[in-house]
């Protein structure tokens, strides 16, 4: 009997090696190489991956781009506006969607709700490998979902479930989860690099050839990234991450990759007794401020995907008794906080070298864009001087190293969103001043950090 060949694949970048080594030479990650047993049946592998792109009868045929037949595959709604927003407008037939999240975030609950609603219009199949059918039925009953039309299947063999799916021809199919699926000709255990990669490739090929919308549920690691080989994210069309702590009833669904829409789109849900409910106006939940104004608190407007969102930022500046004062940022980049404090010292005349600085974005929101720079510095100044800022003030703008205030994307839409929520005064970059006056809103345009400090 021939000896089985093995290789070692990096979980982060997908590079393969003949021997195990502690560090990946391509991406530099440590302890990420996992053993993969190579299959011994090349003919079966060629048959399994033939027609992977779903173009039946077009393999090996060269065509001009203008001659490609643009098949009409219209999107259809999930009956959930927040999920449709993150997906770019709805579901595309033949697409593979990967949803990840921490245990208890609500991945299975969200997909069960969506499929129970879609089953009223389309053929839907929910494949569970981690739970029994009785457990899923109990959850659906507790949530009050319609269960008379949704097809259920408890199976972990990829070949078996694809054979059953070919008989029922579902329009939408959920695999919960990809880590427990396995293929017979792959010798490693379920959840290993080779099993996850081969199972995902087989299921994605089936989805594209039959124009079935495929949802794959994925686990996450301790640092919040999707578990399994990095190549898994390259196979699928859309990667979503469901975030939310156990101490909060709100969940955020963020798009990290989307071949059919914008990335970094954000959907907000609230975990209720009846399941995950859409939050149509997320600014309202993140602006639940106290009645009494306090120093170091300020509202800023950030841009998430295709819409503006108002969030509150808080800063606390306190005298430090350490040789190295602490710089802690929750929801913001900690390195950028240190840089902005240096700009504040150089161009604003405020020295915080002997002060501990703590910054927090209320509601657990993570802000990655630079439009929060000006609001962060004004909140720090407010806390340092123990000076309260007006409750009706909103701020946004990028701060450069020379102390200049740079304009940001979609400035006028941000100002209009603040005006809709009752804010009457705004400090914005001069390049973002609206052409037409907004009723009830006083907009102050600034070019330098010193001008912004004078405005408060």
Image (spheres, grey):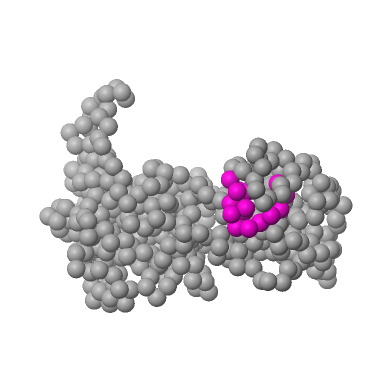
Residue 370 seen in this snapshot: no
Please name whichever residue, 223 or 128, is drawn nearer the observer in this view of the structure. 128
The mark total stands at 0
In the image as oriented, which residue stretches furthest toward the left? 167
Of 174 and 81, nearer the camera is 81
Going by the image, does 351 lie left or right of 249?
A: right
Magenta stretch contains residue 372: no
Q: Let me know if residue 271 appears in the view.
A: yes
State yes or no: residue 427 in magenta: yes
**Residue 61 x, y percent position in the rendering:** 23, 27
Residue 423, horizontal then vertical, whole percent: 66, 56
Residue at 60% x, 68% y: name it.
288
Q: Which residues are magenta?
A: 413-428
x, y percent for residue 370: 65, 48
- Whether residue 74 sits left or right of residue 241 in the image: it is left
* Residue 228 figure quarter: bottom left
Locate the N terminus by quadrant.
Answer: bottom left
Residue visible at 14% across and 56% down in the picture: 168
Q: Which quarter of the figure is the C terminus placed in?
A: bottom right
Q: Residue at x 23, y 36 (%)?
A: 55
């Amino acid at each position: 009997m021939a000896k089985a060949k093995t290789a070692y694949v990096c979980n982060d970048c997908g590079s393969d090696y003949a021997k195990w080594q502690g560090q990946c030479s391509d991406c530099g990650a440590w302890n990420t190489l996992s053993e993969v047993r190579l299959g011994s049946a090349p003919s079966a592998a060629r048959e399994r991956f033939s027609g992977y792109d779903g173009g039946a009868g077009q393999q090996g045929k060269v065509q001009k781009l203008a001659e490609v037949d643009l098949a009409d595959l219209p999107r259809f709604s999930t009956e959930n506006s927040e999920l449709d927003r993150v997906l770019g407008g709805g579901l595309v037939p033949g697409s593979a969607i990967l949803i990840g999240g921490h245990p208890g975030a609500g991945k299975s609950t969200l997909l069960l709700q969506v499929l129970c609603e879609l089953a009223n219009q389309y053929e839907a199949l929910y494949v569970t490998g981690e739970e029994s059918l009785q457990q899923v039925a109990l959850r659906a009953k507790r949530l009050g979902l319609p269960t008379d039309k949704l097809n259920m299947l408890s199976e972990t063999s990829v070949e078996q479930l694809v054979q059953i799916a070919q008989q029922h021809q579902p329009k939408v199919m959920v695999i919960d989860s990809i880590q427990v699926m396995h293929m017979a000709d792959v010798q490693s255990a379920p959840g290993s690099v080779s099993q996850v990669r081969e199972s995902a490739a087989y299921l994605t090929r089936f989805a594209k050839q039959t124009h079935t919308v495929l949802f794959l549920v994925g686990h996450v690691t301790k640092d919040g990234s999707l578990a399994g080989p990095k190549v898994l994210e390259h196979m699928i069309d859309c990667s979503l991450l469901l975030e939310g702590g156990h101490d909060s009833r709100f969940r955020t669904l963020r798009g990290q990759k989307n071949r059919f829409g914008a990335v970094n789109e954000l959907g907000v849900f609230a975990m209720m007794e009846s399941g995950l409910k859409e939050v149509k106006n997320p600014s309202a939940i993140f602006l639940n401020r106290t009645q009494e104004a306090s120093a170091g608190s300020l509202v800023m407007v950030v841009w998430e995907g295709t819409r503006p969102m108002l969030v509150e930022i808080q800063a606390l500046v306190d005298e430090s008794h350490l040789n190295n004062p602490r710089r802690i940022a929750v929801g913001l980049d900690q390195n950028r906080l240190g840089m902005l404090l240096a700009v504040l010292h150089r161009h604003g005349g405020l020295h915080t070298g002997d002060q501990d600085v703590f910054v927090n974005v209320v509601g657990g929101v993570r802000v990655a864009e630079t439009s929060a720079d000006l609001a962060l510095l004004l909140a720090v100044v407010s806390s340092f001087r123990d000076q309260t800022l007006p409750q009706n003030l909103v701020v946004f703008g990028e701060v450069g190293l020379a102390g200049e205030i740079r304009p940001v994307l979609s400035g006028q839409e941000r100002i209009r969103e603040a005006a809709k929520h009752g804010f009457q005064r705004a400090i914005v970059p001069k390049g973002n001043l609206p052409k037409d006056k907004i009723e009830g809103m006083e907009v102050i345009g600034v070019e330098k950090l010193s001008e912004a400090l004078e405005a408060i």
